[in-house]
Image (cartoon, coloured by chain):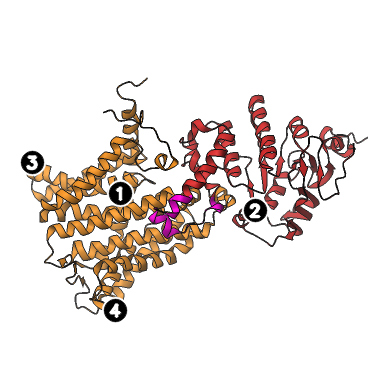
Chain colours: A orange, B red
Amino acid sequence: MFYREAGDFKTSYRDDNQTFPIRLDRAGYWVAIAVAFGIVPFFVNDYWVNAIFAPFFIYAIAALGLNILTGYAGQVSLGTGGFMAVGAYAVYKLMVAFPEINIIFHVLMAGGITAVVGVLFGLPSLRIKGFYLAVATLASQFFLIWLFNKVPWFYNYSASGQINAPERSVFGIIVTGPNTEAWAKYLICLVFLVGVAWMARNLTRGMTGRKWMGIRDMDIAAEIIGVNPLMAKMTAFAVSSFFVGVAGALFFAVYLGAAEAGESFGISKSFLILFMIIIGGLGSIFGSFAGAAFMVLMPVFLKNVLVGGMGWPTDLAAHFEFMIVGGLIVFFLIVEPHGLAQLWRLTKEKLRLWPFPH
Amino acid sequence: MSLDMNANSYVTEDGRTIGPVVMDLKNITLRFGGVVAIKDISFNIREGEIRAIIGPNGAGKSSMLNVISGFYKPQEGEVWFRGAKRPPMRPYQVAQQGLARTFQNIALFDGMTVLDNIMTGRLNHMKTNLLQQAMWWGKAEKEELANREVCEKVIDFLEIQHIRKTPVGRLPYGLKKRVELARALAAEPSLLLLDEPMAGMNVEEKEDMSRFILDMNDEFGTTIALIEHDMGVVMDLSDRVVVMDYGKKIGDGTPDEVRNNQDVIDAYLGVSHD
């Protein structure tokens, strides 16, 4: 079976509109979902979950969030770390205040709170654009971290200034706290990732997405066609912050277990997620996944090769890791400025013609 | 046969019915600092007609269009739309009232496909909220497909089926102009403003575009106001013509009347000052 549309006739606009128009893609997608839900959970161990799956899934959620704001709506943000912190502290306060409510709702509510905060800090975007907006969101990053360190109410007056995730369960399965099984961690992150990705796809293929992209590509033309710039930008900030808040909540509650605002959600986190969407591809759902995978997997891969394969000392390998990852980022940006998603797109276009390119 | 243009509605020589006044501009004056771009201009646009605005460069034609579409707020004068005085509005609110336009230098969304660009034109016809769209199944999808059908009609009409899924950034100039027209048309506007729809086109493309404008007016009954420099095109297409020069109105009437207006001839051919 060749990879192409030929013979796969679309007879309705519904078929023509689907996410994976090519049969092989569609099959691949369902196989991936089936493997991720049906097979992997039986085999994962702590190392795989903590080093690869949990960070990959959580960063992918955050990258999807930032990609909606920056890639689709064209509003640069350097406040991602701060918004993740809002999600983390919100879920912490909720978990402690309402222990009887399911953690799933806590995470969603934390996302909602982050959305409100995001809209608040997004208001300047109505007046300022580009670099200036980046600086404004940078201010929100520093302000939020300062706030969470300064006001003891946020960390419940704990002596260390840290927040610690209490033990919570879903359907009797423990998902937070130190007694969590690897597969439970894996599954809860995966469920949220699939949900978020599905919503992101739906929003970006419909009228909301077109409004965002219109504002990004040419705001004057968007306004003349009937896009309310205020609403479009605010919905972008709200949805984006919601996703980022969910990511922050999971990052703290499920992945880290204990967090401190400046250390876990500092400016480096904002840049990390920005790198993910730039390397993955702006304005692409697939790109968010690819970028998150790249930034999570590359260090793990290098460490295994350098320390495990070549027997280097750990500290030397750690330094080289930084240099190699940095070099690869520069390399990728030069070779393919539109990111991994564009490479993927080109590969698919070539595959469609293969083996008869004329 | 002489036409009574003051009547509520009349039938043109080629059998189209021109209805009552849709857009009435009363004593519009627009200033940028000390520069007077438009000086006390009044004219109206009637339902179903093709109305041209012509004039030499810098006459204030585009400014006039920007006043109508809400980009510029005139210092003096009133805009009446469908029998009601229009309060000061943002451009998107004007669009919601049923007004669409194209730009002199194409204003399309380069990162989106032709189809997506045209679908943005359906914006004011789509009602589902953010949550429904996030869930997709049900209302949002149904609405999307219903509007897709309208867009496909526009695509068929403007003969751009072959580039439906192409990103706009890859298209040549002439096709971009057509896509922009398609986007405006997809909005099913009650008044369509075209800012130099034929600028930079060759004869064939101009013929195509003229055909589209006439067909649009004929088949959908779209009221059209256009700015154009090609006199032949303007005189052939339009029912009535406004002539502007230095921000003032120097002529208004049928193409024949305008052609024989001494002020208009002076403005275009120049006049000797001896």
Disc 1 is placed on an element classified as helix
Q: Amino acid at mark 1?
A: Met
Q: Measure the C-alpha gap from mark 3 to mark 1.
A: 27 Å
Q: Amino acid at mark 4?
A: Trp
The front one of A230 and B271 is: A230
User: Subunit of mark 2?
Assistant: B
The front one of A204 and A344 is: A204
Give whichever of discs 3 and 1 has the lower sequence position.
1
Picture residue at 37% right of the left edge, 61% below the top:
A241
User: What's the mark number on residue A309?
Assistant: 3
- Decide whether residue B130 is among the magenta residues: yes
Mark 3 or 1: the one toward you = 1
Same chain shared by disc 3 and disc 4: yes
User: What's the mark number on residue B71?
Assistant: 2
Q: Which residue is mark 1?
A: A276
Q: Measure the C-alpha gap from mark 1 to mark 2.
A: 38 Å
Q: Which residue is mark 4?
A: A153
Picture residue at 32% right of the left edge, 63% below the top:
A245
**Do labels 1 and 2 touch, CB within 8 Å?**
no
Picture residue at 28% right of the left edge, 45% below the top:
A290
- Decide whether residue A353 is among the magenta residues: no
